Amino acid sequence: MTRTIPSWLSVVALGLMFGGCDEKTTNFLYQGEKLQAVDMHLHVGEWSQIPPPAQEELANNFPFPFNLEPGELAEDQLTTAGIVAELDKANLRRGVVLAVYAPHSVGIATNEQAIQQVSEAPDRLYGLASLRVDRWDTDEAAELALLEDALSKPGMIGVKLAHVHMHFRMDDPRFYSIYEVAGRMGKPLYLHTGNSPFVGTLESAPYADPAYLEEAIRTHPQAVFILGHMGFDFINRTLGDLETCLTLAKRYPNVFLEPSALGSNRSDPEGEKMRHVMKRVKEMGLIDRMIYGSDGPQFPGFLEDYAGKARDAMVAASYTTAEADLVMGGNFERVFGVKR
């Protein structure tokens, strides 16, 4: 049965999406200076392909009234037009959409879906490809070939992995061939670090603690590892393995950091966690290793809100405009070798 969003909810949603935006701009303002900013963590897919427990968890992130009809709202948000509209609202120049193969937890968003969306807005979107690992003993060669094919498509600039969702250990050498392919092709790897609140994820340290990535990082210097969420503990809503991520980035030149989701209203309602992260990054001399991402699009206005929180945290930590520019786009451009 098709559900219809009540007319009053549609009015509220449209008002929040487009109200006050008389002129589109893609210049992100930082202390009065215009920056070309990129959000490297955006999801694609279809609501129907997300398992019901994951749908419930995602809906819990939506504020009222968006949580009343999360499915239809999410479908709109996940379209190419929906994502670009949210980028415009947040004054972000580009976004990166992520494929994921996690049938045990958050579901599947295929490489083909990411490739299609990038092709529909090539001047605004890039994509990260992924692969299945649940039949690795028999399908490794075939999956790696599919990954290489996806990475050869226009605008597909890297690889997305999430060990907690995909059920393989960070230190399992059977999967190091993924890092070898990424390194050989010059495609950076984005890796979820820290635990996850979703049903079906594996929470134990070998799947979540970035310390278990160190051997792979050390033995694959040609591969770039971006530590997504910076080890955040999404179950207890603490900074979790932040210091481990910072230590790895300080120790290895092929390690980068990404602060998505840890500063959301649910995880960080007062903004102190994001402020602490930005402060510690600066104290450790790692501003040139931070690549901004939000974990959107979620609900209308999420990208704008999250980018604003990142800006406020950088201001609180006394980032210069040049330093903020590195975080919001310069490091992305350098690491991925593409225009922002």
Image: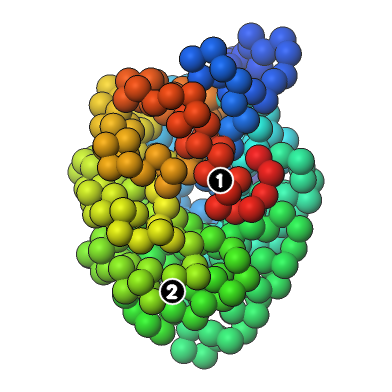
- The numbered disc on residue 332 is 1
Structural distance between the alpha carbons of marks 1 and 2 = 20 Å
In the drawing, does residue 192 fall left or right of residue 307? left
Which kind of residue does numbered mark 1 sit on? Phe
Relative to 281, is 26 above or below? Answer: above
Relative to 17, is 112 above or below? Answer: below
Label 2 crowding class (10 Å Cα cut-off): few <14, some 14-19, many 20+? Answer: some
**Residue 277: where, in percent of width, then height?**
30, 36
In the drawing, does residue 22 fall left or right of residue 136? right
**Residue 17: where, in percent of width, then height?**
62, 20
Residue at image location 34% in from the left, 79% down from the top: 172
Q: Which quadrant of the figure contains the N terminus?
A: top right
Label 1 crowding class (10 Å Cα cut-off): few <14, some 14-19, many 20+? Answer: many
Relative to 151, is 276 above or below? Answer: above
Residue at image location 62% in from the left, 30% down from the top: 36
Q: Which quadrant of the figure contains the C terminus?
A: top right
What is the tally of numbered marks visible in this picture? 2
Element type where label 2 sits in the image: loop
- The quadrant holding residue 75 is top right
- The numbered disc on residue 145 is none
Residue at image location 28% in from the left, 42% down from the top: 284
Closer to the camera, 320 or 183?
A: 320
Closer to the camera, 96 or 323?
A: 323
Which kind of residue does numbered mark 2 sit on? His
Q: Which residue corresponds to mark 2? A: 220
**Residue 272: where, in percent of width, then height?**
26, 26
- The quadrant holding residue 275 is top left
Element type where label 1 sits in the image: helix
Residue at image location 70% in from the left, 61% down from the top: 112
- For the question of whether residue 66 can be seen, the reply is no
Closer to the camera, 24 or 51?
A: 24
